[in-house]
Image (tube, rainbow, N blue to C red):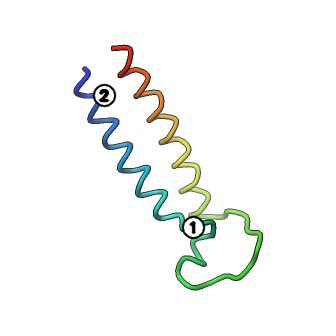
Amino acid sequence: MKEFLLIVNLVLSIIITALILIQGKGAGLGSAWGGGGEFYHTRRGLEKVIFKTLIVCVILFMLVSIANFFL
């Protein structure tokens, strides 16, 4: 069981790292590839999906880490 939780933790950490790198530095996906010059930008479409997926993965990572600690 402990090995399974460690593997899940490792996979989640890789996914979280990839999602953070995809997001770009304080900007939307459009400006990461040369577009956009706006100051304030709301998340739409794919950016919103990536952001929500990141939140879910971080919460799962925390829960799996806590479960791994107590087992």
Residue 62 appears at what percent x and percent y? 47, 31
* In front of the other: 43 or 65: 65
Residue 39 sits above or below residue 37 on the image: above
Q: Do labels 2 and 1 touch, CB within 8 Å?
A: no
First-in-chain label (2 vs 1): 2
Residue found at x 47% / y 42%: 57
Residue 61 numbered tag: none
Q: Residue furthest left?
A: 3
Q: Is residue 61 above or below residue 32?
A: above
Residue 33 lies left or right of residue 14; in this view the side is: right
**Quadrant assignment for the N terminus:** top left
Q: Position of residue 6 (x, y in %)?
A: 28, 31
Q: Which residue is mark 2?
A: 5
Residue plotted at (70% across, 82% down) = 37
What type is the residue that disc 1 sits on? Lys
| SS type, badge 2 | helix
* Mark in front: 2 vs 1: 1
Residue 12 to residue 62: above or below:
below
Q: Residues within 10 Å of mark 2 (few under 14, many from 20)?
A: some
Q: Furthest residue to the right? A: 40
| Separation (CA) of disc 2 from disc 1 | 31 Å
Q: Residues within 10 Å of mark 1 (few under 14, many from 20)?
A: few
Which residue sits at x=32%, y=35%?
8
Q: Quadrant of the C terminus?
A: top left
State the image coordinates of residue 20 (x, y, percent, origin top left). Answer: 49, 57
Q: Is residue 9 left or right of residue 62?
A: left
Write down the residue under mark 1: 25
Q: What amino acid is labelled 2 in the image?
A: Leu
- The secondary structure type at the circle numbered 1 is loop
